[in-house]
Amino acid sequence: MLFADLKLMRPLMDAITAAGYKNPTPIQENVIPPALRGKDVIGQAQTGTGKTAAFLIPFLNRWRPHTLKGPIGVVMTPTRELALQIANEAEKLAPSKRFRCVPVYGGTGMQRQLDGLTRGCDLVVGTPGRMLDHLQRGSMSLSQVRYAVLDEADRMLDIGFRDDIERILKRCPSERQTLLMSATVPDSIKRLVNRYMRDPVHLHMMPEKPTVDKIRQSYFTVDQDRKFELLKRVVEREKPRQCLIFVERKRWADNLYRDLKRAVPKAAVIHGDLPQSQREKIMAAFRTADIKYLIATDVMSRGIDVSGLSHVINYDLPMDIENYVHRIGRTGRIGKDGIAISFVLPEQGEHLTNIEMMINRLIEEDRVEGFEAAAPRASRPAAEVKVVFSGWEAAKEEKPATDDDGWGSDDAPPQSGGGNDPKKPPFGRRGKKYSQRL
């Protein structure tokens, strides 16, 4: 299918061609036609599949120059970076120079946003919190909205935007078209759908298992104190075109940046504690490849869309295994190939197995020749065991010798001694078998 087959108006088609778009992605091919007919749509798809154009094109196709103050369209997003990315895409695909889009988000001054809203605009893209700020100030009205989009709705609910979203939707006219884009549709989203959407078309574009087939995935078993040395050697071997390095905590991101900037050129760090103006400069430099190595936290992962990104390195495995797909999805965008490398601590074997089960794929182990990233298990010092006696009688009591190594099997009942029932573990937790892959 070609974009020309969608029968879009000529100025919009010219803008799409100028942007270099020729064939719609599956999510675009399925979402755009019913949205063009004015239907409410739920688009369930992974990140990196072209969702932004899927919900922008129907709005732009119906847009006409007008004298209203606006906005006539709103797009809610979970992060500031994603809001800016969508606003840039809207301006790139705009069918006329008279089309105006205003991004609104926190962490930066209000004046520029106030000026844009005062002049009048067609589309407002932003985070729910800042949108509510403008509504409460009276600097923005939603009385003329005809088109509303909730992008990455599951993520917005995860970070606590549900009440804000509902307040915003209640201020929009009931006679409007609503699109909801989400990787998952849990009950919390279904409640939003039932309350604020009218007979929506539900397009389920998610595979049973997340699709990461285009991404070459591998992992290294590494001790905590050898991670940075391994990172240097992996970077030297891989020679990435551009590389995104994920860590779990903002403080860890700063610590890694302090070391990495001495080892490689063009390195930077981005996380939520940085001023918004600095984050925007970093993202702009990353998109133009002035920054080659970017260290980031998970909250940034959904707002980073860089076409030249060749490598993603999970310096820390994500605690939430679903974030693994969001992270590595930054590379391999819209059908391109990519490389994802994960650093796994020896005790994280079960966590790695859970990730493999989620993506329905075994991740290959890798090694750097001539470098031992993890000490052999046998050479690790045994943990000191302290024995605490509750009394002299306990000290005299002898226990029968067993082959138990202190880690019970699920199918072997615990032995009782002296007719007394064994103590149950705290909170009823049973012994658990952990993966021995690492």
Image (spheres, rainbow, N blue to C red):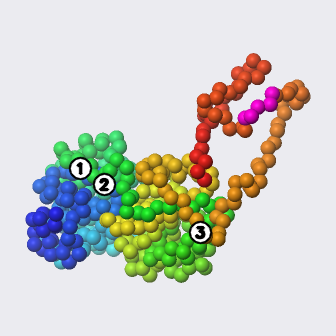
Q: Name above or below for residue 335 compared with residue 351.
A: below
| Amino acid type, label 3 | Val
For the record, the magenta segment spans: 400-404
Which secondary structure, mark 2? loop
| Marked residue nearer the N-terminal end (2 or 3) | 2
| Marked residue nearer the N-terminal end (3 or 1) | 1
Judged by depth in the image, the label closer to the viewer, 2 or 3, is 3
| Amino acid type, label 2 | Ala
Q: Which residue is mark 2?
A: 45
| Marked residue nearer the N-terminal end (1 or 2) | 2
**Identity of the residue drawn at 53% across and 57% down:** 317
Which secondary structure, mark 3? loop
Residue 229 in magenta? no
Other residues around mark 3 within 10 Å, as few (<14) / some (14–19) / many (≥20): few
x, y (%) of residue 30?
A: 20, 56
Other residues around mark 2 within 10 Å, as few (<14) / some (14–19) / many (≥20): many
**Identity of the residue drawn at 15% across and 71% down:** 12
Which secondary structure, mark 1? strand
**Identity of the residue drawn at 50% across and 58% down:** 364
Q: Which residue is mark 1?
A: 203
- CA–CA distance in space, label 1 to label 2: 9 Å
